[in-house]
Amino acid sequence: MASPSSTTTTNIMLAIYEKKTNSLDLYRPLRNYIVINYSEREAQNLEDDLQTLKQLRSDVEKGGGSDSLAARRDLLQNYYKALCAVESRFPISADADHVNTVSFTWYDAFKNKQKASQQNIHLEKAAVLFNLGATHSQMGLGFDRSAVEGRRQASHSFIAAAGAFAFLRDNEAMKASVGSSTTLDVSVECVGMLERLMLAQAQECVYENTIAKGSSPGVCAKISRQVGLFYEEALAALTVAPLNQHFEKGWIAHVQLKAALFYAEACYRYSLELHDKEEIAEEIARLKSGINALSDAKKSSPRGAAQQLLDAINKLEANLNRNLERATKENDRVYLMRVPPASSLPPLPSFSMVKPMPMNEVLDASRQKMFSSLVPDSSAKSLSKYTEMLDDIIRTQAEKLQQGSELARVRLKEMDLPDSILALEGNFTLPTALKEEVEAVQICGGPAGLEGELQQLKDLRRVNHEMLLQIEEQLQKEATEDVQFRNQFGTRWTRPQSSTLTKNLQDRLNRFAANLKQASDSDARIERSLRENSSLLSILDCRPIETALPTLAKPIMSLDANEDAVVGALKQSLRQLEILGAQRASLEDMLKEMKRKDDILPKLMTFAGSHEDLFRKEISKYDSICHDIAQNLEAQEQLLMQIQAQNDEFAAIFNLEDYKASREKGYRQIEAAIAKYREIKDNINEGLKFYVTLQDAINIVKQQCSDFVMTRNIQCREMIDDVQRQLSGLSFQDGKTTASSYSFSSTGPPHPPQRSNSQQLDQASIPPNSHHPTPTYQPPQQPPMPAYSQPPPYSNQQQPPPPYHTPVSAAYPPPQHQQPPVSHEYGQPAYPGWRGPYYNAPPQQPGQMPRPPYTAQPPYLPPNQSGYYRQ
């Protein structure tokens, strides 16, 4: 039954209603048994215990409507311990000499019209444990989860509920399911599902507290993923027989949507951490995976889910889509990373913060004093002795079975079986670790993908080179114009020369060009390495990779043509060995089942003879299975000797040693190809990072050059106007005779006329500051550019704008730590991590690396808040 949680919380959870029962009188049947088997006096002495038991049963029958949940929990725990005392002293069954007038009746908690009636105290104990778990689940829903303490208490209650259902599954579920009258709610499958459901809700409470206290996105993602895993386990049990037709559609819809919700929540939180690490490609893949999970769940889940849960899913889906759009734009504009397919992503990390509460101490009835005088201590000690004897037999036989299986595995490994047979049939596979490495290379595009990445290097190098040429042309054009005006106006052109002002810029551009040339050489070495190792790398393109390995085949020439007979006999022996292994597994299961059903307490309580005789009789039940175990191990030893002889003959005919040597050589070749692939790919990645960072540095210098040229053009216009005014003033003073001597030409410098001394004095009397020249452009003072292996600092330069300008009110808060001052003009030398034998760049000097191009603070929601959990 679904019950809503507190209205102050942000999400709904499920609780279980208790099982119902019919009225039952335990007092009279148990008292009669005491009188018949012991005495009336003993019955009178135990009157208080009988009355207490009667009252406990009566209170349990009333249900939990009138009591507080805590009182109901204590009642069920006390009644269960009382039932343990009853079980050990009163044999309840249909036998004539047992308590045969007591029949327990309980109704299914989820199908109220179904009921079970048994003369079996284990049904009563199972029902009480079920109701105990249900009570804990209702307590969990009763707490106010809008506060930290409420969420902690709710989590504790759900953990206790999971512990009750786990205890029921391990101790009473099988015993309560015997006979034809049973209910599904106390079956192993159902209580196991309920245990997973309660753990999911307990972990969900922990997750809500984790979000509330502002934990990192990585921690939130791990805890959220574990919530989803618990819900997925519960859903797996709900969607298969026998539970798939037993629960309401709303239950299945709730659990299915919760599983998808917390998987998507984990993808969302994990993507925030990836964003901080600048792993944009995987961030995009994780966001897409979360969106697909939510979409599939909404399409496939049955109707009946709460609207509040659907709203939470829609809010989370909107957050995922928004972040996906931002990350995709950044990748397209800045990173240009290849987004991996969802199938290639490793599983999301998870971390469980909850586990079922151990109920052994809570429900321990060993200190129960009820009916303690009814059974002698000698009987209890005898039962303990028999249990020790039985445990010793079970432990010894289980060890023999395990040793037999381990011996067979080791012997076959020594003979390289069944790998050699599989290789002969063409079904051989690589070792798991090596195969996973090859698949990882192939998923990334394999050797063919390196060509595309190499082309990216060339494109980025070309772009940087073209940018440098544009800057050089811009500066050269300005310098040429300055020379023309200087030649035209002569000494009146008092502006500093361009070559003097642009010396620092030119030096930096020259160093950029040198670094670009050095990077070009590195690119050539990478390309040469790819070409030289193409034949080695081609092995990684084989699909499947096993086709690149040598094959085991029949010999070309055969004397007696008995190869097929040898192979057939060896296969038959291996099949027989497999059959023996399956028999051992069956024998071990039989041992465990016999021990589980071996309950001699009723016999011990009613046996009149020696307990030793009873023990010998009961232990003899295990002689047959012990004999079967011994026969199995002996047959396996004989079969292994036969397989050894057959394998020796097989190895001689098929020259197995040469095949193994060739196979190992193939392994080493594949490993070498993987190592070379990774080396080249790492070098390409370093090159890509270098060019992207260098491009940012060139852009900065380009902007400075543009500012310089603009400033110089303004100065040029003002100085031309100033010179023309000077020339006009002199012409007016000299009169018409001198006016003709000033010929202002745009193609050559002016020719000043001869002046008289008075005119020179008048000119000299002009104040030196009568014409205020426009201040010349002063480029930022830059430190000398170091060698290519040590990029220059650009901490005084203006940073380029980030990809996104996030407003102050954006939901994604700025980092809490200050970014250290950037100390390099561009991010890296040619390839700072180059390890190839053909690169001998000087070592990089210590210093801080520049801020990478990923500087935007995208308007994601903060890691400690989402739309789903916002109040």
Image (cartoon, rainbow, N blue to C red):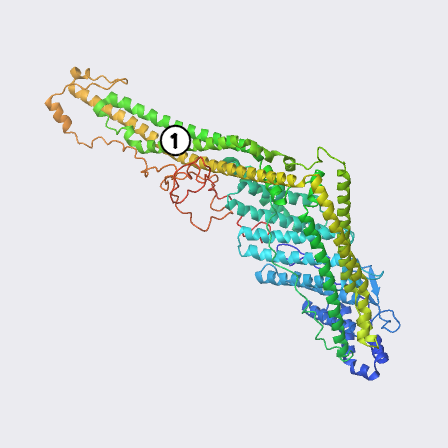
- Most extreme residue toward the bottom is 41
- Secondary structure beneath label 1: helix
Q: Which residue position is annotated with label 1? A: 513
Residue 553 drawn at (x, y percent): 70, 36
Residue at (70, 54) in percent of width and height? 407
Residue 588: percent from the left, percent from the top? 75, 58
Q: Position of residue 567 (x, y in %)?
A: 75, 41
**Residue 235 visible (yes or no):** yes
95 or 352, which is in the foreground?
95
Instruction: Give the quadrant of the C terminus.
Output: bottom right
Instruction: Quadrant for the N terminus, please.
Output: bottom right
In percent of width and height, residue 20 lies at: 78, 64
Of the pair 299 and 744, the residue shown nearer to us? 299
In the rendered image, which quarter is residue 766 located in?
top left
Which residue, as the protein is rendered here, is positioned at the far right?
96
Crowd class of label 1 (few under 14; some 14 to 19; many from 20; radius 10 Å): some
Residue at image point 72% right, 38% down: 425
Picture quarter containing residue 737?
Answer: top left
| Kind of residue at disc 1 | Ala
- Using the image, determine if residue 256 lies above or below residue 688: below
Answer left or right for 853 relative to 49.
left
Q: Residue at x 27, y 28 (%)?
A: 497
